[in-house]
Amino acid sequence: MNALILFSHGSLLCGSVEAVEAHAARLRDRREFDFVGVGFLNYSQPSFAETVHEAVALGATRILILPYFLIPGFFVSKSLPEVLTPIQAQFPNVDFQVAEALGFDTRLADALWESALSARTADNDQWSEPLKRATLSCRPSPDCPLYQTPLCPKVPGEKKLHD
Amino acid sequence: MTEALVVMVHGSPRPVANKEMLRVVEELRSRPEATARFPIIEVGYMECNEPDIPTAIDQSILKGAKMVTAVPYFLHTGTHVCDDLPGLLEMARVRHPSVIFKMGDYLGLSPRLTDILEQRAQQKG
């Protein structure tokens, strides 16, 4: 069984998973892999190790790790091998491969262009939208900057974002 | 009305880390439809590199921009995208009350990236 795991940095802000989860959902719909999951290096859940365990438990014999990073910088070249090496030792019969980071692609210019074009005609206060949407992926994490602020849907309070 | 596009980038202590992003911006600058709409295309960094975002915004206005569309070159809804970058735009609005400011979706929201990710997976397949 072929598995694909998007390897992502993670963030204290619960809502940071929005984009990578959306990519995973679209890749899942394309059915090129029997399993598509997301595993985070820091803060967000599930951890990379947890997602590997899930894929192996479901029968994965080959796991392609796809870095959701702009460049093959520190996290891809140093942190990923650090978390991957003990996992590989744990599952010697699983074939682990690592794909390239996003890097350069003309479609990134397409994405920039399309974002700029739709922003030109959007409402002036569109820049508050990501913060509102971030609360959709909320879990009650005291480390999240929105925790106990009026925006947190799980544990709202009077705290200010910058406290 | 002259329009500017300001690409808002995180920045890195290793400037070489910006190389691919700068290629993407160059790619956009090479497209006539992009420069017709945005004759001014600037890059501004949040940390580590020059120019910083307020400077990039001010430069684009010095060059004649009456409207500035800022797009975060970020993959996630982190605190930078949610809070720091909108804060920088609010401050720019105060410095330049006659200029219109817009902020686009951050790069990671684009389904184009799903296609790139799929290709990166296939290249290893």
Image (tube, rainbow, N blue to C red):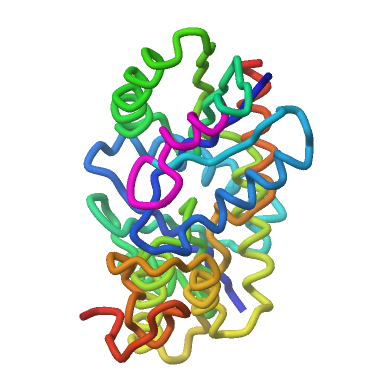
- Between A105 and A99, the residue placed more toward the observer is A99
Query: As drawn, which residue projects farthest toward the right?
Result: A30
Q: Quadrant of residue A57?
A: top right
- Determine whether B71 is above or below A67 in the image: below
| Residue A128 is at least partly visible in this image | yes
- Looking at the picture, how far across and down is residue A77, in whole percent? 34, 25
Q: Is residue A83 magenta?
A: no
Magenta-drawn stretch contains A43: yes
Q: Which of these two is toward me, B119 or B63?
A: B119
Q: Residue A1: percent from the left, percent from the top?
A: 68, 19
Q: Which residues lie in the magenta part?
A: A41-55
Q: Position of residue B70 (x, y in %)?
A: 50, 67
Give the side of residue A92 with respect to residue B45, left or right.
right
Where is residue B27? Give x, y as percent.
59, 41
At 40% from the left and 85% from the top, the residue drawn is B93
Question: In the rendered image, which quarter contains the N terminus of chain B?
Answer: bottom right
